Amino acid sequence: MKDTEKTVYRVVRRRAKPGCEKAYEDLVRGMLDESSHFHGYLSATIIPPDSPQGEYQIIQRFSSQKDLDHWDASEERAIWHERLHSLAESDPDYRLLTGLEVWFSPKLVPSSSPPPRWRMTVVSWLGIFPVVTFCLWFISPLLAGLPFLVRTAIITVIVVALMSYVVMPRLSRWMGWWLLKK
């Protein structure tokens, strides 16, 4: 898979002007709704500030950098940013996330309701079961001469790496329709 085809996570940080927080958040939600109609859009989450003078964080997820670039270059996005400019203290700060950073984000307040926990559990199990089975079937016999804790450490490193970089990015993309189904 080319780098341009990997799921892209972008964090946008910005402060609303004092007293404009509600209007700012409403506009951000409108913009995220608009972006959801673009090809490659997967999800977006708003994290409100933890203090009155804090920054909003928006996490956007697109199927590829090309899809994110298409949204960034769109007239629709430019219009929303113009509207947001009057309610924000500064220009937005952007950062792309990769790998494990995405798994360890703070508690999120989604722009739409999160998937039910039981569905997230099912999708996680669908990823973990085959990875652990593979490791126990094929790798564990190769490690039989090692002490138990060393074997466990090696197997868990393999499971975590495969889950983070191979299995979960694909599963969340393939099962997204079901996770977000109402």
Image: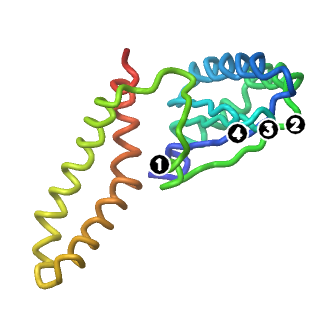
Q: Which mark sits nearer the N-terminus, 3 or 1?
A: 3
Residue plotted at (15% across, 56% down): 133
In depth, the one of 110 and 1 nearer the eye is: 110
- Residue where numbered disc 1 is placed: 103
Q: Which mark sits nearer the N-terminus, 2 or 4?
A: 4
Residue plotted at (60% across, 35% down): 60
- Residue where numbered disc 4 is placed: 12
In depth, the one of 129 and 2 nearer the eye is: 129
Where is the C terminus found, in terms of image quarters?
A: top left
| Amino acid at circle 1 | Trp
Where residue 40 sits: x, y (%)? Answer: 53, 31
What is the spatial separation of the Cα atoms under label 4 and label 3, in whole angstroms? 6 Å
> Label 3: how many residues lie within 10 Å, few (<14), some (14-19) or many (20+)?
some
Residues under numbered marks 1 and 2 in contact, where contact means CB atoms less than 8 Å apart: no
Q: Which mark sits nearer the N-terminus, 1 or 2?
A: 2
- Residue where numbered disc 3 is placed: 92
> Label 4: how many residues lie within 10 Å, few (<14), some (14-19) or many (20+)?
some
Where residue 130 sits: x, y (%)? Answer: 19, 50
Q: Secondary structure at mark 4?
A: strand
> Of tags 3 and 1, which is closer to the observer?
1
Residues under numbered marks 4 and 3 in contact, where contact means CB atoms less than 8 Å apart: yes
Left or right of residue 166, residue 8 in this image:
right
- Residue where numbered disc 2 is placed: 90
| Amino acid at circle 3 | Pro
Q: Secondary structure at mark 1?
A: loop
What is the spatial separation of the Cα atoms under label 1 and label 4, in whole angstroms? 17 Å
Q: Secondary structure at mark 2?
A: loop
